[in-house]
Image (tube, helix red, strand yellow):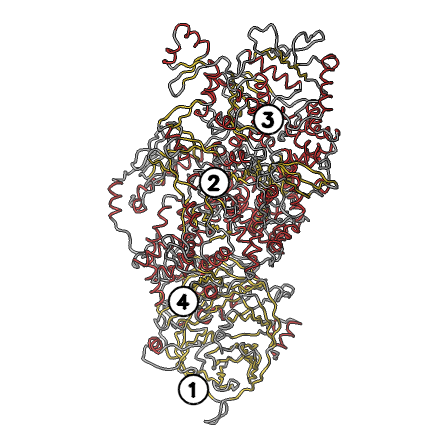
């Protein structure tokens, strides 16, 4: 029968033909919209009789009245004509007819695509395709994403009964997938024709979908086939066009042509290509030769009326107004106007799905349904969301959030016993709906005990049920919000078995569909993937990680999702169940026949559920903004938000009934989630519901665990960027989560965390577990491990998590001991391990299986992962961050559900999976556990962020470098004989280097591993110098000058004398001490004239000590930046560091708590206490620790600033000893205020003796008078347990004795007015009388503490005068007899005391205080011949803090001013003004005097001069105190603490140790070898010849720009005139001793040549020599900072340029994933490293724009002389200009200024950055001049607002930064910080920061506290600016750089 299709007119006649026709007319009802949209084919539900009747009537009416419907319409007619000679059918579309042929393989003809009535727009497309078919032209259907183009092509093929060969192109498609593939059959390689060849030979239509996805070198293989219908095949055959073949056939036989391997291309062969328009969409543009071979047709969206009718047909019974509004909104979203906004295309082809949902559940929210199609909330920025909301509002589709998402729930699910569907009853708002949904085949659901339903979950499940009814869907949510759990619950409700497929970035189409493998006989076969198996079995396929997979790979699933059809690599096809059934029924095939023909039936219950994380809004990266227009067409989307606090709390309470202490954690988590700060939002992802459950379980079992530590552990807070760390700490404090106070000593920690195994029980700390009993102990690690407090604490936490059943993740720097900790932990547990180390080349296959080739067969061996799963071992995965994250992400399913698919078709399942046992099933052993090790995320490692991708499924532990004491404890065990001082130097130096690495100042994070290796070396070779051993680590950096300088500076700072000469010794000059001569006697006389008269007994009154308090003062902690002073030169000075003083502070006293008086049983260091005034503060520094504390006592002394300017507080300190060794007595002498302060806890007690002294103090405090005298405190023995503290008032006759241990005060009344008091012992005190200077001895009975006797001392010499002038010092201990004999040059044994008076260097009282007659020997200052004496006018009196007695060496130390020493004492080259003063050391034992110069004040403070002025005793602000081992500490007025070693014996021992650190010089043979290679050095330096090739030159003296040469301009050589970079070649450094050989005349000539070249360069850039010097003055201050900043930028840039694996190569390394292809003989089986080109069409990598806003107001110039703020700003700008040079492609910057003149003055434009020093200097001078000459005023707010608004307009940038430099002088102009913060953060697309570089008082600190966290910084030292910029960069730029 002839079926004829033609264009009908009014005269058309049916005649004698049997006609079946469809007419496409607007307005007619059409059946089966799926013929146009996703699913395709007929609707399985039968139409109602009324519908059919109405349809026929409309068709008949349109035939009879064609003119009534508008333009002439295209009709489709199949007919049988009597005029046909062949009897074949003919199809006519309008005026185009095509003769049909019967297909040879009817199963290859598409079915159920063509509907009964097609829209006119579709018929026009079909007619055009038929025209091209008749012309034998290949066609290209181009249009927006969606199934429409493919369905049109399939309709045409179904209508014309043409067989189809379909291939979905992807980035993984290769030539073999199109032409021929080699397979091994019966051990022989055969070529198997692929789709293109089959189609060409059999006359089929080849459909190529996804042209833009294929790589550009793949499709050209088809060019000749398309153009000439010719192709050379790999098996030797040649495809020839039909015409050419037939012509040859006329003259040759078929056998001859077959022998020639000629194959005829069928004349019916056609190609239909389907693709997206590029560059509108992302992809590869068409190759011009390929494009020219196609005829194109744009397949756009259907007209509105066609869509409307189709939707009304699908949604029969749905409110027409709803359909109309939905469609109107959808058409609006695909209009040209909407496209101009850059919004993703709306998926029109999916509208039928939501209409079907409306038909089943009419009360469903329209907005909610549209958001499932178009989830704009999660994929658009605010502007795009606003546009969509406006469109919704326009069509009355915008609903309130409550109305759109309330009242939905799954009420009931009714499943039949054998049915594959179920009836689900849903609560939809206020109505109930019943829907039919497919179900799985599991009859008994396995309920999830861990799933706790909430109303929100019920609502989401009901929506998922609706979507499940009509289409596959995707759940989008943040990491850890419960997506996987919810989907498992969904599957359980419907009886589905879940097949989880983890998606990853490098996943290929073969991984998704089919993988090649070999049979035991060696033949190649194809193994179905889990996804295909799920499709055949009717399982629920869960695609986890859609955001990770490449869109080009994921595109192969389009047809499976849209049409439920799939073409596999082995040629088989999967058909939708109704199409499969139709083909089988129409041809009478059995299932076996269908399988033999390669047709497989997709189960009707099969569904796909995708899981994904939220796209990154605004990202230009396709991997972050993954939700594209193409993906929108594939699924319905459900956005899953994190649970609210009440919901989350409900879930946690149900799962952890015993939970406690979670309220604060919950508050914190939800504060972070709701924060507008991007950095805090990123931290919120680490506190997911899964992590909160983990914390709750931990606290339920271990309630003593610190919540603070658990939060830090969950967030890995230790490795967060510093800005984020600070913000997190503030949030923790806001919810009252604080860090627990650590034990006060390392010993306490050591006692708390110990380890032991007893009776099979392991105990770590307080946690216990039974040890494991393995079958074999071969794989139990056993390593050398020395316990230390830090690691033991970590292992206890690990043990607790292990007991909770957690898998562990250890994150830390390299070399911190992660492997050691794990191995030790497993050893203690007695657990065997399997170990696998990952690397950049690790693939999914190698992680799970290890493929090898044996006898030509690919055999898969179990990887350590599989063995661990089978045997229940611990799997240790090392270097997890080195492998691509997409590879390690496959571990997620193994950790979460215990399931994983292997490459050899086996699968790992959990024990309760319900699957039947089989050889392909591996059940996870219940004892299996996974321990993962990874380096820290972020800078400087820049590895893959394993923690960010999978951290929340593990219990995480941050393994940091050990603290100082822990590392010392460990190193002592590795090197027990290595001196403690050496170990401490190494620990401190490496600790600082690690900190610098964390901050990005250096690139390599030096590890504990390297320190251990050095200690091992020193232990084994004790005579080896530390310097040479240290070089074993740092020789790596010897050729990197910047890094080497930084490292050396750090090593020197900590006393490692690299580069020092053992002869570099510079000790103070020694002068002979005048001999001690007899000066007279002291006679101690009793009261009365009688010989036996008793001493005068003093009255004693006991008082109760009144204690007020305690009050707890705030303690500020600072890092003590200690610098060792003997790095290059050996001097008396040991170390120094600066206190962080307030700018108005003045030093008033210093005292030391000596280590021997602290808690016994520990190695204690001295603690230095420094008191300041204005404000009154107490600083405490433990010399063995790296931190100092400050207690601000302003609240205790609030009136000091209000007193008369004549009031100058005078404070003295008295440290106490054990058990009060944490306390210090602070005494203010003018008001007699006495405080007891605990310097560790901040506890403050006010002590009130209640004596006359206290009453006097009260009077003074009420009415202060300067002439009242002062109170004094003597505390020589305050650190002894029974040592008294004495208080007295000058010119008064009472003494108060304070006993702190007993809490008592004794008041002694004396018959004299006291001027001074010296404690010669605990019981003997020397008093001097006021005005008369008479001396008295007050003695205390040792047996009766309350018995005091007073005796007068007669002091006369031979002239009747006093032996000693005014006393300054009386020693509290005697000289040893040997020392006394040496000092007096006679052998003597007697009680004695060293004395010091104003007119003598040193004196000795022989017999004092025990004898009644005391001989005084004095070294008089006037007797010195070699030393000047004090100036006659200088009557300076030393105070207690400026003179000290050194008991172990017998020396007297004084502080002298520079004017009090002879001129020859001042070191050569130094001027007195550069020194603070001198330490005068009078040594009577060695009879010498030494004067040690004290360096000048590094940061002089003009504000404290008011305090020192007028104080004759301390007019130059130097204080001193005695330390242990006769050491001294001095503090200058600038707060610089210096430690001194003064004893001669100690100095000699230290010198030996210092020289041993340096070691022996290296042997000179190395030098001789260099001399020989170096050759004779020419006399004259020169520029050198220019090599035009730019080749590297090493050594020699010929070419300029070389390296390691001599006398030519280059790098790293010797004797050259100047440095010259030869074009980026490697630099080879000449050794220092080689440089030292260069003759002086050559060096002089080189300097002259360099100077001439420098001047010439200045001329070239028009820069004078003065300009050059001026520029260098600014630049030299920030040179090291420039290097640091460039190191940061280099590292970031290196990461962005890292090479990747390029696959499908014909050379390189063998790709293990293509072993089988290699066996089969394919060529593209290699991979190689290379720079991967960006995907064509992908957004261009844009630079980051930084706008620096400088404050050039008058206040900057005004206060520059005060604090250098303007200079600091100019240095900062200069640093930025130099550091950013060369990074133009990555960073663009602008510099603007603001002042009273206005808000915006441009200095640097982004397109014209300065190129040389002259241009940079001009900018610096312009900034300076503006500040100097502008009018006063401030435009900070206006300037910031203008900068934010202007930079927000920039489009061609990746990120925008505004950095405001300000002097914090905002209060003067009424600028509120809150307003400033609002402007700075006004635009979310602009990262705004302010850096305060100047401050009056604490202005900047106060403003910073009121600014948003992480947005404000205080930088009062330019050296800190790189660190601040690095914080800004790493917190915002690192992820996208």
Q: Quadrant of residue 1486?
A: bottom left
Mark 4 or 1, nearer chain start: 1
| Depth order, front residue of 1215/352 | 352
| Depth order, front residue of 1803/1786 | 1786
Query: Can residue 1278 be seen here?
Result: yes
Mark 3 or 4, nearer chain start: 3
- Real-space Cα separation, disc 4 to disc 1, in angstroms: 36 Å
Q: Where in the figure is residue 1680, as x and y percent of width and height? A: 45, 46
> Few, some or many C-alpha atoms within 10 Å of disc 3 (few <14, some 14-19, many ≥20)?
many
> Few, some or many C-alpha atoms within 10 Å of disc 2 (few <14, some 14-19, many ≥20)?
many
- Real-space Cα separation, disc 3 to disc 4, in angstroms: 104 Å
Q: Which residue is mark 2?
A: 901
- Classify mark 3: helix, strand or loop: loop
Q: Where in the figure is residue 1818, as x and y percent of width and height? A: 52, 37
Q: Which residue is mark 3?
A: 147
Q: Where in the figure is residue 368, as x and y percent of width and height? A: 68, 37
The N terminus, quarter of image: top right
The reply to whether callout 3 and callout 1 are in contact (CB within 8 Å) is no
Q: Which residue is mark 4?
A: 1428
Q: Is residue 692 above or below residue 1355?
A: above
Q: Which residue is mark 1?
A: 1412
Mark 3 or 1, nearer chain start: 3
Q: What is the number of callouts on the image?
A: 4
Q: Which of labels 1 and 2 is toward the front?
A: 2
| Depth order, front residue of 653/18 | 18
């Amino acid at each position: 029968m002839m079926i004829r299709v033609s264009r009908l007119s009014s005269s058309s006649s049916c005649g004698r033909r049997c006609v079946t026709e469809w007419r496409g007319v607007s307005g007619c009802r059409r059946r089966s919209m799926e013929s146009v949209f996703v699913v395709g084919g007929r609707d399985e539900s039968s139409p109602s009789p009324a519908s059919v009747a109405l349809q026929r009537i409309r068709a008949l009416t349109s035939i009879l009245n064609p003119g009534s419907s508008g333009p002439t319409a295209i009709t489709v007619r199949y007919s049988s004509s009597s005029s046909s000679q062949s009897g074949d059918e003919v199809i006519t579309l309008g005026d185009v007819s095509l003769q049909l042929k019967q297909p040879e393989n009817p199963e290859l003809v598409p079915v159920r695509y063509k509907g009964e009535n097609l829209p006119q727009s579709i018929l026009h497309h079909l007619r055009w395709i038929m025209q091209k078919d008749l012309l034998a032209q290949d066609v290209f259907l181009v249009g927006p994403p969606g199934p429409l183009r493919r369905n049109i092509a399939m309709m045409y093929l179904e209508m014309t009964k043409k067989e189809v060969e379909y291939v979905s192109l992807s980035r993984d498609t290769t030539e073999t997938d199109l032409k021929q593939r080699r397979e091994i059959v019966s051990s022989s390689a055969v070529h198997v024709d692929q789709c293109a060849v089959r189609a060409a030979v059999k006359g089929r239509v080849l459909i190529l979908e996804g042209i833009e996805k294929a790589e550009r070198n793949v499709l050209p293989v088809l060019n000749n086939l398309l153009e000439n219908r010719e192709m050379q095949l790999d098996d030797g055959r040649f495809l020839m066009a039909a015409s050419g073949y037939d012509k040859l056939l006329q003259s040759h036989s078929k056998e001859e042509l077959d022998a020639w391997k000629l194959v005829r291309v069928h004349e019916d062969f056609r190609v239909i290509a389907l693709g997206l328009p590029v560059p509108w969409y992302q992809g590869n543009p068409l190759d011009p030769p390929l494009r020219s071979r196609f005829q194109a047709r744009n397949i756009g969206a259907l007209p509105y009326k066609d869509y409307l009718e189709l939707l009304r047909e699908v949604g029969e019974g749905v409110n027409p107004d709803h359909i109309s509004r939905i469609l109107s909104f959808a058409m609006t979203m695909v209009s040209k106007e909407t496209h101009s906004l850059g919004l993703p295309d709306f998926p029109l082809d999916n509208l039928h799905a939501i209409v079907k949902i409306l038909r089943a559940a009419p009360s469903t929210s329209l907005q909610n349904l549209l958001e499932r199609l178009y989830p704009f909330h999660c994929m658009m920025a605010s502007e795009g969301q606003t546009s969509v909301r406006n469109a919704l509002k326009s069509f009355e589709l915008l609903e309130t959030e409550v109305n759109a998402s309330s009242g939905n729930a799954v009420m009931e699910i009714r499943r039949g016993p054998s049915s594959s569907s179920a009836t689900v009853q849903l609560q939809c708002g206020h109505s109930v709906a019943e829907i039919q949904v497919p179900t799985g085949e599991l009859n008994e659901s396995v309920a999830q005990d861990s799933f706790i339903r909430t109303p929100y979950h019920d609502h989401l499940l009901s929506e998922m049920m609706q979507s499940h009814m009509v289409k596959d869907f995707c759940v989008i949510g943040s990491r850890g919000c419960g997506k996987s759990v919810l989907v498992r619950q969904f599957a359980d409700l419907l009886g589905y078995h879940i097949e989880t497929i983890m998606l990853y970035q490098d996943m290929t189409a073969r991984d998704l569909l089919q993988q090649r493998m070999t049979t035991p006989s060696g033949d190649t076969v194809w193994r179905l993937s889990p996804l295909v198996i799920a499709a055949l079995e009717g399982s629920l396929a869960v695609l986890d990680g859609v955001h990770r997979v490449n869109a080009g790979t994921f595109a192969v699933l389009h047809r499976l999702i849209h049409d439920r059809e799939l073409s596999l690599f082995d040629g088989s096809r999967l058909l939708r169940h109704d199409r499969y059934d139709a083909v089988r029924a129409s041809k009478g095939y059995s299932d076996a026949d269908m399988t033999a023909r390669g047709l497989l039936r997709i189960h009707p219950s099969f569904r796909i559920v995708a899981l994904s994380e939220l796209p990154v809004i605004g990202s230009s990266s396709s991997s972050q903004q993954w939700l594209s227009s193409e993906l929108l067409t594939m699924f319905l989307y459900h956005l899953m938000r994190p649970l609210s606090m009440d919901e989350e709390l409900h879930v946690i309470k149900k799962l952890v009934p015993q939970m406690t202490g979670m309220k604060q954690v919950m508050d914190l988590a939800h504060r972070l989630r709701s924060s507008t700060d991007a950095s805090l939002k990123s931290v919120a992802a680490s506190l997911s519901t899964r992590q909160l459950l983990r914390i709750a379980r931990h606290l339920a079992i271990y309630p003593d665990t610190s919540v603070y530590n658990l939060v830090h552990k969950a967030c890995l807070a230790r490795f967060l960027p510093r800005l984020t760390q600070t913000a997190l700490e503030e949030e923790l404090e806001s919810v009252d989560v604080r860090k627990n106070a650590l034990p006060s000593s390392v010993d306490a920690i050591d006692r708390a965390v110990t380890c032991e195994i007893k009776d099979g029980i392991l105990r770590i700390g307080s946690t216990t577990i039974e040890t494991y009993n393995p079958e074999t102990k071969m794989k139990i690690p056993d390593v050398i491990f020395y316990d230390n407090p830090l690691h033991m604490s970590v292992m206890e936490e690990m043990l607790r998590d292990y007991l909770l059943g957690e898998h562990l993740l250890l994150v830390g720097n390299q070399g911190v001991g992660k492997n050691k900790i794990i191995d030790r932990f497993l050893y203690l547990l007695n657990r065997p391990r399997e170990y696998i180390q990952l690397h950049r080349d690790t693939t999914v296959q190698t992680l799970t299986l290890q493929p090898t080739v044996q006898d030509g067969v690919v055999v898969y061996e179990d990887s350590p992962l599989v063995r661990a799963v089978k045997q229940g071992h611990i799997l240790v995965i090392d270097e997890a961050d080195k492998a691509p994250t997409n590879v390690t992400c496959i571990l997620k399913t193994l950790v979460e559900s215990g399931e994983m698919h292997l490459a050899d078709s086996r699968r790992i399942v959990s024990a309760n999976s319900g699957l039947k046992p089989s050889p392909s099933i591996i059940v996870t052993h219940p004892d299996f556990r996974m321990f993962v090790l990874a380096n820290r995320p972020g800078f400087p490692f820049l590895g893959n962020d394993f923690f960010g991708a999978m951290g929340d499924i593990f219990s995480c532990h941050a393994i940091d470098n050990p603290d100082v004491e822990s590392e010392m404890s460990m190193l002592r065990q590795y090197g027990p004989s290595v001196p403690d001082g050496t170990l401490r130097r190494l620990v401190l130096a490496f600790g600082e280097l690690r900190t610098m690495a964390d901050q990005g100042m250096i690139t390599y994070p030096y590890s504990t591993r390297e320190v251990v290796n050095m200690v091992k070396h020193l232990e084994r070779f004790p005579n080896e110098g530390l310097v040479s051993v240290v070089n074993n680590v740092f020789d790596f950096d010897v050729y990197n000058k910047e890094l080497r300088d930084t490292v050396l500076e750090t090593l020197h700072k900590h006393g490692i004398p690299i580069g020092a000469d053992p002869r570099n010794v510079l000790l103070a000059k020694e002068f002979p001490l005048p001999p001690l001569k007899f000066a007279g006697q002291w006679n101690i006389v009793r009261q009365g004239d009688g010989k036996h008269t008793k001493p005068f007994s003093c009255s004693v009154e006991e008082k109760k000590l009144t204690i007020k308090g305690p009050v707890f003062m705030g303690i500020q902690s600072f890092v003590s930046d200690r610098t060792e002073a003997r790095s290059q030169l050996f001097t008396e000075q040991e170390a120094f560091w600066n206190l962080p003083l307030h700018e108005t502070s003045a030093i008033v006293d210093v005292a030391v708590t000596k280590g021997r008086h602290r808690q016994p049983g520990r190695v204690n260091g001295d603690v230095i206490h420094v008191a300041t005034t204005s404000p009154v503060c107490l600083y405490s520094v433990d010399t063995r620790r790296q931190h100092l504390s400050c207690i601000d006592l302003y609240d205790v002394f609030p009136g000091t600033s209000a007193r008369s300017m004549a009031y100058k507080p005078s404070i003295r300190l008295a440290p106490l000893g054990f058990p009060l060794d944490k306390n210090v007595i602070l005494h203010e002498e003018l008001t007699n205020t006495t405080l007891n302060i605990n310097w560790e806890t901040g506890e403050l007690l006010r002590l009130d003796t209640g004596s006359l002294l206290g009453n006097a103090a009260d009077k003074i405090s009420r009415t202060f008078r300067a002439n009242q005298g002062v109170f004094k405190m003597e505390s020589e023995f305050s650190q002894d347990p029974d040592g008294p503290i004495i208080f007295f008032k000058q010119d008064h006759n009472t003494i108060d004795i304070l006993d702190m241990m007993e809490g008592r005060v004794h008041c002694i009344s004396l018959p004299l007015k006291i001027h001074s008091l010296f404690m010669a012992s605990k019981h003997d005190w020397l008093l001097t009388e006021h005005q008369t200077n008479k001396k008295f001895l007050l003695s205390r009975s040792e047996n009766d503490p309350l018995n005091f006797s007073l005796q007068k001392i007669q002091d006369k010499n031979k002239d009747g005068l006093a032996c000693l002038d005014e006393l300054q010092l009386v020693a509290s201990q005697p000289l040893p007899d040997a020392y006394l004999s040496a000092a007096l040059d006679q052998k003597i044994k007697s009680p004695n005391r060293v004395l010091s008076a104003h007119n003598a260097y040193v004196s000795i009282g022989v017999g004092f205080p025990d004898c009644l007659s005391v001989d005084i020997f004095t070294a008089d200052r006037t007797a010195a011949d070699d030393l000047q004496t004090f100036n006659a006018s200088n009557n300076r009196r030393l105070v207690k803090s400026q003179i000290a007695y050194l008991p172990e060496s017998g020396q007297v130390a004084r502080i002298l001013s520079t004017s009090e020493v002879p001129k020859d004492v001042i070191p050569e080259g130094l001027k007195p003004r550069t020194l603070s003063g001198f330490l005068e050391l009078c040594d009577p034992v060695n009879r010498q005097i030494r004067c040690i110069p004290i360096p000048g004040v590094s940061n002089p403070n003009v504000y404290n001069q008011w305090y020192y002025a007028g104080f004759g005793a301390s007019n130059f602000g130097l204080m001193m105190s005695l330390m242990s081992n006769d050491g001294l500490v001095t503090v200058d007025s600038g707060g610089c603490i210096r430690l001194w070693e003064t004893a001669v014996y100690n100095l000699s021992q230290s010198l030996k140790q210092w020289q041993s650190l340096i070691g022996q010089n290296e042997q000179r043979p190395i030098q001789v070898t260099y001399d020989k290679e170096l050759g004779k050095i020419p006399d004259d330096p020169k520029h050198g010849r220019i090599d035009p090739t730019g080749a590297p030159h090493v050594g020699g003296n010929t070419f300029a720009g070389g390296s390691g040469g001599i006398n030519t301009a280059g790098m790293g050589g010797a004797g050259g005139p100047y440095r010259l970079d030869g074009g980026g070649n490697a630099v080879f450094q000449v050794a220092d001793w080689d440089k030292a050989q260069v003759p002086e005349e050559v060096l002089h000539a080189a300097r002259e040549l360099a100077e001439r070249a420098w001047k010439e360069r200045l001329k070239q850039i028009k820069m004078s020599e003065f300009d050059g010097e001026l520029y260098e003055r600014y630049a030299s201050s920030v040179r090291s900072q420039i290097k640091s900043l460039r190191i940061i930028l280099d590292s970031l840039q290196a990461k962005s340029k890292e090479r990747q694996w390029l696959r499908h190569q014909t050379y390189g390394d063998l790709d293990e994933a293509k072993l089988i292809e290699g066996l089969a003989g394919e060529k593209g089986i290699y991979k190689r490293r290379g720079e991967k080109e960006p995907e064509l069409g992908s957004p261009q990598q844009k630079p980051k724009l930084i706008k620096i806003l400088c404050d050039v107001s008058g206040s900057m110039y005004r206060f520059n002389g005060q604090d250098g703020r303007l200079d600091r700003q100019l240095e900062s700008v200069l640093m930025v200009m130099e550091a950013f040079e060369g990074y133009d492609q990555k960073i663009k910057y602008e510099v603007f200024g603001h002042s009273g003149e206005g808000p915006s003055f441009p200095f640097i434009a982004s397109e014209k950055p300065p190129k040389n020093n002259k241009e940079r200097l001009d900018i610096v001078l312009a900034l300076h001049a503006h500040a100097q000459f502008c009018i006063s005023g401030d435009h900070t707010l206006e300037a910031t607002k203008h900068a934010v608004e202007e930079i927000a307009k920039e489009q061609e940038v990746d990120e925008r930064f505004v950095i405001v430099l300000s002097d914090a002088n905002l209060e003067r102009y009424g600028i509120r910080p809150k307003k400033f913060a609002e402007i700075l953060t006004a635009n979310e697309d602009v990262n705004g920061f302010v850096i305060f570089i100047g401050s009056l008082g604490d202005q900047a600190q106060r403003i910073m506290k009121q600014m948003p966290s992480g947005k404000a910084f205080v930088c009062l030292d330019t050296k800190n600016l790189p660190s601040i910029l690095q914080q800004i960069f790493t917190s915002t730029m690192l992820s996208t750089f």
